[in-house]
Structure formats: C-alpha cells, structure tokens
Image (cartoon, rainbow, N blue to C red):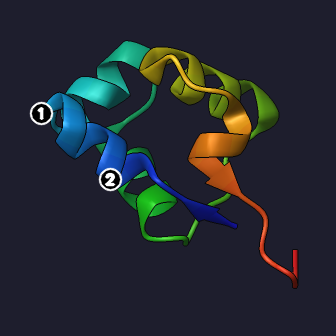
Amino acid sequence: MKNNIKVERAVRDITQQELASAVGVSRQTINSIEAGRYVPSAVLALKIAGYFGKPVESVFLLEDDD
C-alpha cells in the first residue's frame, strides 16, 4: 500500500511527531507507515486522512499486489 503522508505533512509543514501526537500513535509508527513497512489499521488510516481533511483514498493507495 502506498501513501501520501509525507507529501501531506510537507504541504502543512508539520513533523512526524506532530502528526503522531494528533492521531495518538508514536512518531516511529508514522515513520513506518510512510516508509511502507507498516499498513495502518482502518481506524488509524481514517484518523490520518481526517487530520488532513482528505478522503482515505487520496492519502492511502492500493497497489496491484495488495
């Protein structure tokens, strides 16, 4: 699963830590999601997308092998 979290953070000029605090996870979790090492739960994906005011589908993108 791909994601646009890093781009969305850059647009809003926020750090991984700021996003992590806003959605209730660790900075390492955000880092792992951005790097594609961790696929978030549906709840966490909704929280992240909601934080950015975007639909989940515009932040998280399924790849052909997902």
Per the image, label 2 sits on a secondary structure element best described as: helix
Residue flagged by tag 1: what amino acid is it?
Answer: Asp
Residue 14 vertical position relative to residue 39 in the rendered view, above or below: above
Q: Place residue 32 in its image quadrant.
A: bottom left
Residue receiving disc 2: 6
Asked if residue 7 lies left or right of residue 2, the reply is: left
Real-space Cα separation, disc 2 to disc 1, in angstroms: 10 Å
Task: Please state the horizontal and vertical placement of residue 27, each as a whole percent of the image.
Answer: 30, 42
Q: Residue at x 37, y 36 (%)?
A: 26
Nearest the eye: 7 or 1: 7
Task: Please state the horizontal and vertical placement of residue 49, each as a whole percent of the image.
Answer: 57, 27
Residue 13 image label: 1
Q: Residue at x 68, y 24 (%)?
A: 46
Residue 43 image label: none
Residue 66 vertical position relative to residue 18 in the rendered view, above or below: below
The residue furthest bottom is 65
Residue flagged by tag 2: what amino acid is it?
Answer: Lys
Q: Residue at x 43, y 70 (%)?
A: 35
Q: Place residue 18 in its image quadrant.
A: top left
Residue 24 visible in rendering: no
Cβ–Cβ under 8 Å for marks 2 and 1: no
| Quarter the C terminus occupies | bottom right
| Quarter the N terminus occupies | bottom right
Nearest the eye: 23 or 50: 50
Per the image, label 1 sits on a secondary structure element best described as: loop
